[in-house]
Amino acid sequence: METPVAPAAFEQHSGGTSTAAPVASASALFTAWARRHVVWIVIGALFAGMLVYVTVSKLQAPAETAVLSTRNPAPEGGMALAEILRRHGVTVTATDSLEATHAALAGSDHATLLLYDAHGFLEEEQLVGLAGAAGRVVLVAPRLRTLGALTQDIRPGGVVPEGTGTLEPGCGRADAQAAGPVSAGGFTYQGPELCYRTRPEGPGMVAGSRDGQLLVVGSTALLGNGLLDEEGNAALALRSLGTGQDLVWYTPGLGDIPAGNDAPTLDELAPPWLAFLGPWLSVVALLSMLWRGRRLGPLVFEPLPVVVKAAETAEGRARLYQDSRAVERAADNLRAGAMTRIARHFNLGAEADADAVVDAVSRRLGRPPQEIRTVLVDHRPQSEGQLVQWAQQIERLEEEATAR
Amino acid sequence: MAITGRFVLLAFAGLVPLLLFPGWPALLLLCGGLLVILVADLLLAASPRQLGLERRQPGNVALTGTAESVLTISNTGRRPLHALIRDAWQPSAGAANNVQLLDVPAGERRRMAVSLTPRRRGDLAAPHVTVRSFGPLRFAARQRTVPLPGTLRVLPPFHSKRHLPSKLRKLRELDGKAAVQIRGAGTEFDSLRDYVRGDDVRSIDWRATARRTAVVVRTWRPERDRRVVIVLDTSRTAAARIDNEPRLDTGIEAALLLAVLAERGGDRVDFLAFDRRVRARVESASKGKLLSELVQAMAPLEADLIELDWQQIPGQVRAVSAHRSLVVLLTTIDGGAPEEGLIPMVAQLSRLHVVVVASVRDPMLAEMKEERTTASQVFRAAAAERALLDREAVSAQLRQLGAEVVDAEPLELPPRLADTYIRLKAAGRL
């Protein structure tokens, strides 16, 4: 906010005589301003970045994970099939609601409807309506309820036995003949026209009605991205679905469950005033924040003095000694300290040597000089343990010697 | 502007009509009502711009004392003022009641007294005063901050004052006012008087005795009108905290005791606080009010994190006194720095002057030296011994140069320095 004002103010002040200076001062002012508010700028940038990220990720179409969805690139998805059909001139319209499907079907004559209702969301009348609107219906792995609503001819016949690799066409349908063997899997059906039987005279994986308007494919894997390029899968799928100009690819969702007279929602149960309670309480909370948050004038600074701990250098040196295991150096210091104090106690003068000190101590304590000399002069501790022991020894000796 | 707790309560009470008649009309009505009340109360509040604020400066106070800062608030507006007033002293000023609720009728004035118990030496500031003027309904307030600088100078406490009587007694003993007479160098002939038992027979003046019938002795008094220059080091070493007191404050205590003592002893005292430039200076001309001038000069002193410029010290001392003087350096003789600065400077200074170097010794070192139970404690003891030996070496060097060294723990330093002064005076070395 300050930056746009600054150059103008400067020009007024300088009378506009210099051209370079206002620019320099503006950039300098901006730099100063930016330096002062660097924390807020960084926080603001982070916040803006997060906002952009969230917005973008929300705007992107969520990755589809549903089986046989035209936008699902996973092995069980149907994206490959839909794309191939599109490239060959078939208009593929993917829908996930009944209304959209009806609208798509109404837009063209004799459109093919691919219906994959894995959970059996659709009711009988909805299915009949759909079948009436569509030219041809391809049911993928239908449940009993779905199948029963559309035809009485075809009935479920179990599943393809485990371990079956491929199935031979074994029927007269042109599509099946052209495709040859396909990957086995999914459900089988009994009906008037059966292909890909699991056993002679047994149920088949692909079944057609007598009038040719209904085709049932028992396997979703056959149409999925993963197995489409194997055996004759692609040929069968493309020939089954690509006969017409239009294909409506309908995978019913939760929204297709017919709304009955369900239990009332929480919103309907709540009394009308409840909608105002929360917002007003937050208004009151905001007001109380303003009430408590308003400071009685700006803060007053306390210029704190510098504080340095005096013994810090000695402590640091102690840690250096310990880290480098300077046992000898430490012992020398302790010895020198004790000797100096003893010499001063006996008034031996500044030039007194170790012998004089040993003599004085041994005379005072009445102990042989050799013993005193061992402790005071000759002993050289080799380890930390010895150092501790000797340090206490020399301290005791000093105390005894200087005690009156 | 500011809102009050009462307004928040009012908004909370607004929940009742809102719940009884839920809907947008009630909400709008409620918001509008609250806004009207807020604006009306704000408009009816006495304007904080129509106030006359005056401050009576609290002046000086010793660190342990209590001062009073008085604000006078005069209401020049037409509406009565009901306001919360904050006299914004900095935290270490120890203001007990700096926020007060005050009623000032229109056209009148009221006083607001704030008692201050400072916790730090130095100049403590109160940059501004804030007035929060409430409306008649007490729902909202108008707030304004007026710059109104105030300063409280907190003087050093002079705890070492308690040593003064005993040291003065010692000084009087020198002065010939007490029974004991000392004759020696540096004393001047004062007067003749009759011999009383107990006098030193050596001080009998035979010539005067021959002229009279009674035995007459000479009395002596110590030399007077000598110059004492106290130099206080305010560089980085003065910031070191020893026994929970910065070295600077210990130095101030010692300097105060010495200055008062020397003044009573008839000497002229100059004070100088110095790091790279002069931080404070008190001239010897100010006789009689030396102590007050000293504490005034010392109050705002702070240790700076810079190195002392030793080379300037002789020049500074020369500027104060060209004659032979007692130069007291309140600094440190911790190992490391003195070899480069202090020792050469003392060598130079002691050719002309008597130099006393006073340094605070850390009692921590003595404690560290005693503890020898574990390995790390023994290493600490060794490090402490090394530090003490270094100090010892520096003070030996200084003594060799003819300087006196006073190396004592914080509480001991002022009396020890005073003793050194008395000893030097008695020996006539000033």
Image: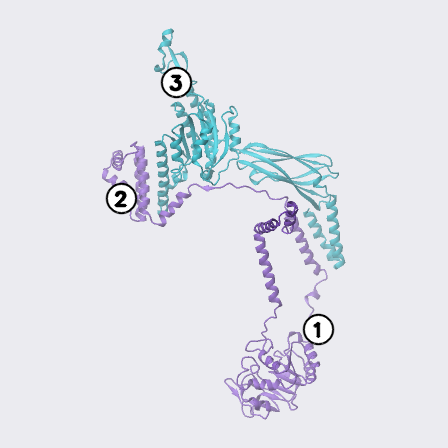
Residue type for callout 1: Asn
Task: Give A35 or A19, whichever is nearer the viewer.
Answer: A19
Q: What label does residue A379 carry, if any?
A: 2
* CA distance for labels 3 and 2: 54 Å
* CA distance for labels 1 and 3: 122 Å
Does B307 appear above or below B21? above
Q: Earlier in the sequence, mark 1 or mark 2?
A: 1
Closest to the camera, between mark 1 and mark 2, is 2
Does B381 appear above or below A258? above
Does B155 appear above or below A126? above
Report whether mark 1 lies on the same chain as mark 2. yes
The image position of residue B265, as x and y in percent, is 45, 23
Chain of residue at mark 2: A
Give the quarter of the image for residue A108. Answer: bottom right
Give the quarter of the image for residue A180. Answer: bottom right
Q: How many other residues sit within 10 Å of disc 1, few (<14), some (14-19) or many (≥20)?
A: few
Quarter placement of the C terminus of chain B = top left
Secondary structure type for disc 1: loop
Q: Which residue is identified by label 1?
A: A261
| Chain B: drawing colour | cyan
Closest to the camera, between mark 1 and mark 3, is 3
Chain of residue at mark 1: A
Q: Is residue A204 left or right of residue A123?
A: left
| Chain A: drawing colour | purple
The image position of residue A60, as x and y in percent, is 61, 69
Residue type for callout 2: His
Q: What label does residue B181 carry, if any?
A: 3
Q: What label does residue B297 carry, if any?
A: none
